[in-house]
Image (cartoon, rainbow, N blue to C red):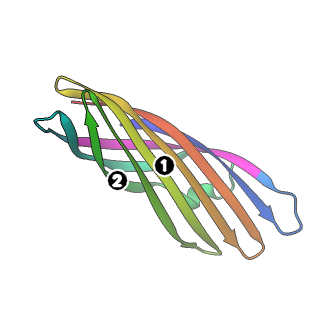
């Protein structure tokens, strides 16, 4: 898989007007689908995603130090019937970097069409990160789609 997610970030400092910036992350890696079909036609399995994300474009000062080049690994249960499979999964993370704390909620979903021995569809990613520190707060959002063709 190979795709780009785009985002915006806004920040407010106490006593200052808010500012915003834009960024893009390139996401590359592999998607592995394990799918079983029951005798009644119901489909179930797992979709595993492994790869890296790297900031490719940013007007945000210091963003590459926060997001940086980092690995990701997601696994989700898929279900479906007929020729359609899907999943939606939410991930939450929180922590800190020097001078700030963050909370992230990301929703990853996939809808695909099964045809013979392959599945075609789109992986959709939507995330919101709220961050705060002494005298400032902000929010970053990003979204994107990656087409997947699994054989």
User: Tag 2, which secondary structure?
Assistant: strand
Q: Which numbered disc, 2 or 1, marks the residue that appears first in the sequence?
A: 1
Residue denoted by label 2: 74
Residue 61 position, x and y percent, is 69, 55
Residue 41 position, x and y percent, is 17, 33
Neighbor class of circle 2 (other Cα within 10 Å; few <14, some 14-19, many 20+) is few
Residue 134 appears in which quarter of the rendering? bottom right
Residue 140 position, x and y percent, is 64, 54
144 displayed left or right of 117 = right
Tell me if residue 123 comes above or below residue 60 in the rendering.
Answer: above
Q: Is residue 58 visible?
A: no
| Rendered image: mark on residue 22 | none
- Closer-to-camera residue (135/110): 110
135 displayed left or right of 144 = right
Quadrant for the C terminus in the image: top left
Residue denoted by label 1: 54
| 28 magenta-colored | yes
Q: Which residues are magenta?
A: 20-33
134 displayed left or right of 43 = right
Q: Which residue is rendered at x = 17% and y = 23% of the image?
A: 116
Q: Which residue is rendered at x = 81% and y = 66% of the image?
A: 13
14 displayed left or right of 116 = right
Residue 143 position, x and y percent, is 55, 42
What secondary structure is the stretch in magenta mostly built from?
strand
User: Tag 1, which secondary structure?
Assistant: strand
Q: Which residue is rendered at x = 36% and y = 30% of the image?
A: 121
Quadrant for the N terminus in the image: top left
The residue at the far top in this view is: 115
Q: Nearer the viewer, mark 2 or mark 1?
A: 2
The residue at the far left in this view is: 39
| 148 magenta-colored | no
Question: Total number of numbered labels?
Answer: 2
């Amino acid at each position: 898989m190979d795709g780009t997610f785009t985002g915006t970030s806004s920040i407010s400092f106490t006593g200052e007007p808010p500012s915003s910036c834009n960024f893009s992350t390139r996401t590359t890696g592999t998607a592995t689908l394990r799918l079983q079909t029951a005798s009644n036609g119901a489909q179930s399995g797992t979709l595993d995603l492994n790869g890296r994300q790297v900031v490719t474009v940013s007007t945000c000062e210091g963003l590459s130090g926060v997001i940086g080049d980092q690995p990701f690994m997601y696994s989700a249960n898929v279900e479906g019937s007929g020729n359609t499979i899907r999943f939606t999964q939410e991930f939450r993370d929180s922590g800190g970097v020097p001078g700030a704390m963050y909370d992230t909620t990301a929703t990853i979903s996939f809808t695909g069409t099964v045809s013979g021995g392959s599945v075609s569809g789109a992986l959709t990613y939507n995330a919101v990160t709220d961050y705060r520190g002494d005298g400032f707060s902000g929010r970053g959002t990003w979204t994107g789609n990656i087409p997947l063709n699994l054989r």
